[in-house]
Image: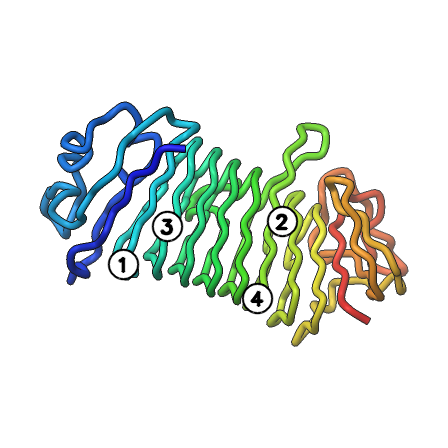
Amino acid sequence: MTEIKLVLKKEPEFPLEADVISPDQFTGKTLADIKKLIVYYGNEEKTLGEFFDISGKSGELTDLKIIIEGNLSNVKRIGEKMSAGEIEINGDVGMHVGNRMTGGKMLVNGNADDWAGAMLNGGELEITGDAGHYVGAAYRGFWKGMQNGIIKVHGKVGDEALTWVNGSKPANRFPTLICGSAGSFLGIHGHGGTIIVEGNCNRCVGADQVRGTIVVKGKVSRILPSYKKLGEVKEIELMNGEKINGKFVEYSGDHSVEKNHSKIDKKTGIISNSSNGRLFIAA
């Protein structure tokens, strides 16, 4: 695997838009070409070489790895729309890292700001620290968020992670989020995602979930009253066929909104013949 290394010269005072930092943008270019790639600093056009010392050698897209050193908390959109190759970030990173990825692997050895992996559609994004709000979520005005791939956050994710997630077993699309703990409204408006939380969650998990599976191995501060308790289980089968063993309480929901092709039982108020999601919380 060929490698290109970027070392931040000085932390930018203002947010730096650097979506050009991607194997898709680097492949087939010389170091001189890469240094001339355009980035946006405030309302000014700059070159990538003005902010980074760049070394190494480019190669084929699927065989290219980009290593970035420095505090990138004010650098945005790294790895945007990348389709292959690898990126390793050694330090904190700014907003929109790995957004709209369709392939490849990205590793952040640090924390990530809001919108990490937003609308991810393939590949793998791993964050060893915490991530901000809207991890894997749909951008405002879009009805589909993350549709494939996997996001792993070892620490905590903020509010509204995986909003409008959209997976499909027949289409072999299994968008998955694995995190240490989570804020409020995890998986809101879910349509077929898989979320595994190793620790605790805040309120309103799975609000308006139509399809999908959420597994919480810790506690939830407040379970929505529109979720129906089904009983205890010792094994959970995920959409992709993988299984999780342990003691969990299973709930179905969200029953607060009528779904397509569903009927409401007038006596119980429970929606039947619908494809409501599943929520499992450690017993």
**What residue would you read off at disc 3?**
96
CB atoms at circles 1 and 3 under 8 Å apart? Answer: no
Q: Quadrant of the C terminus?
A: bottom right
Q: Position of residue 171 (x, y in %)?
A: 67, 28
Judge whether 2 appears above or below 94 on screen: above
**What residue would you read off at disc 2?**
190
Label 1: state its secondary structure.
loop
Q: Disc 4 vs disc 2: which is toward the camera?
A: 4
Q: First in sequence: mark 3 or mark 2?
A: 3
**Disc 1 versus disc 3: distance between alpha carbons?**
17 Å
Q: Residues within 10 Å of mark 3 (few under 14, many from 20)?
A: many
Q: Disc 4 vs disc 1: which is toward the camera?
A: 1
**What residue would you read off at disc 1?**
70
**Disc 2 versus disc 1: distance between alpha carbons?**
36 Å
Q: Nearer the viewer, residue 219 or 36?
A: 36
Residue furthest out toward the bottom: 221
Q: Residue 193 vs residue 159: left or right?
A: right
Q: Nearer the viewer, residue 245 or 208?
A: 245
Label 4: state its secondary structure.
strand
**What residue would you read off at disc 4?**
182
Q: First in sequence: mark 4 or mark 1?
A: 1
Label 2: state its secondary structure.
loop
